[in-house]
Image: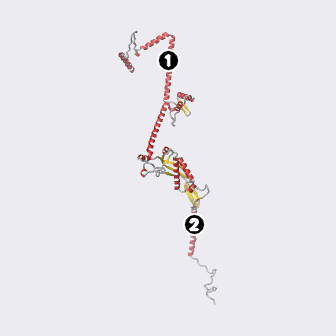
Amino acid sequence: MVSPDDPTQPDSPNAPINVDSAPPAAPDPAAQSLSDALRVAFMLLKIVMIILIAVYLASGTFTVDQQQAAVKLRFGKIVGEPGQRVFGPGTHLGLPLPFESRVVVTTAPQSISLNQAFFFERGAEEMTKTDEELAQEGRTGPLNPLTDGYLITGDANIVHGTFRVTFRVTDVEAYVRNLGDLAQAESVTRTAAERGLVHAAATVEADDFIAGRARLSGATDYANRTLTDLRTGITIDRIEVIRPAMPIAARNAYNQVNNAEAERAKAIEEAERDRARTLSNAGGPAAAPRSDRRDGPLTQLINAYEATPRTDPRRADLETRLNQAFRELSLETDRGSFVIGGEAALIIEQARSVRTNLAEGVTREAERFRQLNTAYQENPKLFEQRFLQAARRNFFNPENFNETFFVPRESELYLEINRDPRIQKERERKQAENLGVADR
């Protein structure tokens, strides 16, 4: 008997199905749509993943601006070959986080101020007042080392001051390795600058520091040596004194000294002007001081002549040069010719005029004497008579107001000192008449 569940029977439900002989099944629209959607989604996911991967890889690219430098850190360690670890301005490639990171450092000059390190403490009500006002109000007393800053100069005086420190990063690799933080860099630079100022102040005098004449280049050098020893990669370009000051307790006394110095300088300046004016009036351009306040060539020559001993052979040469200069009223030097003028030239011209007049007068007198001598040699008696007659005419001329007294021989002579009033009155009358004629 054959069982209906026998799979070998064709009609049995457990009989195997012949796929090749089975008719094809109809496609399911929902399954097809799901399959297409999944295929598109997977494709978009691939694209998004590729884009994300590209963006992630591109995030390692970095740009360095002007006056900046950068280094790459791979797991906290600076990477790159020696000499090629610092990247300058431009765009550079790198690995993204967390594989690599970048540290960008500003290489432009930066500055910090030292306003309190070496200055005395000022209360809130004193911030708006000047040092002069505080001194006039009588603020005195010793400094408090806990709150008041100061410097000790080379002459053992106390001064105050505010300063500006200009620095820059010159070794980026050392800066990143040992500092890496601007706040820490400023702190280290501030400390080094303060040490340098303490060192430099000990080499200058208080007056020079207060007046702004002190050179503090030693402070910069000392601070840079400290920064180099610490391998900070920082270099200080300069340390400037912004506000030099003195202790308030000494300001009034210092002002008195300054006023005295100013008056002294004013007196010296006035004396120099008077001296220059006197020399110019005395000798003109050759004696007047030059623009650099050095004496003129004539003054220098005279000073050299007076300072040379008489036994010195050079004195004769100096005397020759002086005589030639005064004769020519001009002095030749390496810088050119200088005219001798002023009172010296006037006196020389007057002396020349007097000399000429004297020479002419002596010549006229000599000529007159020669003529008289010739006349006397020709006829002595006649010359004597003519000479006596001329003398009598001149002596007895009424206009000469001569008074003649004849004294008898062997008699006493009395001379009255007082003048005869009649004769005096007659003389005054004639003088008045002569004046009247002259006025008309």
Query: Callout 1: few (<14), some (14-19), or many (20+) C-alpha neighbours within 10 Å?
Result: few
What's the residue at 54%, 47% (across, down)?
218
Image quadrant of residue 56? bottom right
Q: Nearer the viewer, mark 1 or mark 2?
A: 1
What's the residue at 48%, 10% (across, down)?
382
Res. 335 mark: none
Residue 353, above or below 219: above
Image quadrant of residue 253? top left
Q: Amino acid at mark 1?
A: Glu
Residue 270 position within the rendered picture, expressed as x and y whole percent measured from the top left: 46, 36
Q: Which residue is mark 1?
A: 365
Q: Amino acid at mark 2?
A: Met
Q: Quadrant of the C terminus?
A: top left
Q: Which residue is mark 2?
A: 49
What's the residue at 51%, 13% (across, down)?
373
Q: Quadrant of the N terminus?
A: bottom right
Q: Of 97 and 117, which appears nearest the observer? A: 117
The mark that comes first in sequence, 1 or 2, is 2
